[in-house]
């Protein structure tokens, strides 16, 4: 019965992902004119202007995504893509001292996961500007390294993707990850200056959590089919806590739910 349950869950998720990408619509990728071929490379820089903070949205339907810190401007990005219809749209609006930055793939430009294609985004942000960040990735691999950025809240939603995330210990207060199919690695190591609330929801795939040994950490883990590995943690029902829990000025609280897949928790 377990095998059947796993098969049904996987089948539903795959079908749901295909519908989400529009694979069964009249606008599906096999009905489109093929404009692929030559690899296009484009650089885009967005100045900070008078912005003292920024609200950042990234929306990529398919491809690879790399996010990190180190820009002198608000954002410095390089996009490589092999379809004209995949040319990313970058919008920046300044309202007083708050900037709103959107980087997105045009709607309906891709309606399915298409074999050997290129759509690679490398986005570098300013390390001095506090920001909120909302990232949506359909299909592809993502590396989101916020360790030296001042991101206060992070929301990540993925379809079929392997995703690696490093938090922002100096400023971050909340992380919300919703994953469809694939692996999620969430690295929370660092010197946390405040409590942080973390929520991870996974459909089918593994979740790997890495937490600092020196910061009190408590997890509530709910899973369907799969195991939990939590070396060095005390277990009570579905709750896991490390030896630092209750003894430090800051606390990492993690809520994990996985449909089918494993959960791994390690300390460094």
Image: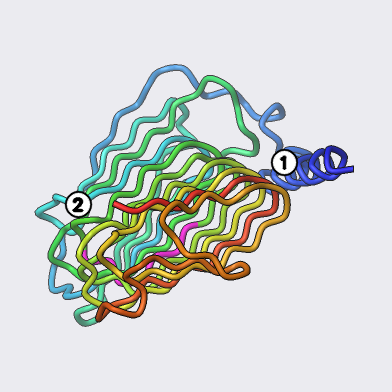
Residue 25 at least partly seen:
no
In the image: residue 23, left or right of residue 48: right
**Can you tell which quarter of the image residue 181 is in?**
top right
| Label 1, residues with CA under 10 Å away: few <14, some 14-19, many ≥20 | some
Which quarter of the image is occupied by the N terminus?
A: top right
Query: Outermost residue, top direction?
Result: 37
**Residue 127 in the figure: left or right of residue 236:** left
What secondary structure is found at the residue carrying circle 1?
Answer: helix
Q: Which of pointers 1 and 2 lies earlier in the amino acid sequence?
A: 1
Rate crowding at label 2 as few (under 14), some (14 to 19) or many (20 or more) other CA atoms within 10 Å.
many
Check disc 1 and report the residue beneath it: 18
Mark 1 or mark 2, which is nearer to you? 2
Quadrant of res 78 = top left
Q: Main secondary structure of the magenta part?
A: strand
Residue corresponding to mark 2: 69
As measured in the structure, the alpha-carbon distance from the residue carrying label 1 to the one carrying label 2 is 33 Å
Q: Is residue 72 visible?
A: yes
Nearest the viewer among 62 and 142 is 142
- The residue at the point 30 percent across, 63 percent down is 92
Query: Which one is in front, 49 or 182?
Result: 182
SS assignment at label 2:
strand
Q: Is 153 one of the magenta-colored residues? A: yes
Please say if 154 is above or below 119.
Answer: below
Residue at image position (61%, 32%) is 113
Q: Position of residue 170 (x, y in %)?
A: 20, 69
Specify whether 56 is left or right of 158: left
> Magenta stretch?
150-156
């Amino acid at each position: 019965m377990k095998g059947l349950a796993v098969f049904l869950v996987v089948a539903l998720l795959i079908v749901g992902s295909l519908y989400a990408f529009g694979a069964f619509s009249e606008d599906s990728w096999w009905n489109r004119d093929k404009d692929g071929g030559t690899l296009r490379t484009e650089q885009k820089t967005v100045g900070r202007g008078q912005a003292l903070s920024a609200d950042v949205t990234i929306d990529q339907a398919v491809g690879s995504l790399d996010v990190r810190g180190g820009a002198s401007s608000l954002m410095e990005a390089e996009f490589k893509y092999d379809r004209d219809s995949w040319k990313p749209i970058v919008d920046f609006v300044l309202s007083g001292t708050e900037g709103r930055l959107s980087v997105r793939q045009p709607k309906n430009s891709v309606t399915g996961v298409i074999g050997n294609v290129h759509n690679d985004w490398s986005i570098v942000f300013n390390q001095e500007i506090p920001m909120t960040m909302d990232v949506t990735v359909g299909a592809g691999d993502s590396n989101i390294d916020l360790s030296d950025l001042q991101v206060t809240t992070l929301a990540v939603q993925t379809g079929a993707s392997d995703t690696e995330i490093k938090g922002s210990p100096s400023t971050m207060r909340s992380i919300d990850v919703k994953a469809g199919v694939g692996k999620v690695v969430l690295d929370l190591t660092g010197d946390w200056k405040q409590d942080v609330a973390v929520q991870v929801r996974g459909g089918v795939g593994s979740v790997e959590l890495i937490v600092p040994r020196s910061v009190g950490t408590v997890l509530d883990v709910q899973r369907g089919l799969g195991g939990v590995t939590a070396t060095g943690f005390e277990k009570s029902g579905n709750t896991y806590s490390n030896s630092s829990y209750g003894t430090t000025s800051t606390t990492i609280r993690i809520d994990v739910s996985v449909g089918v897949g494993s959960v791994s928790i390690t300390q460094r």
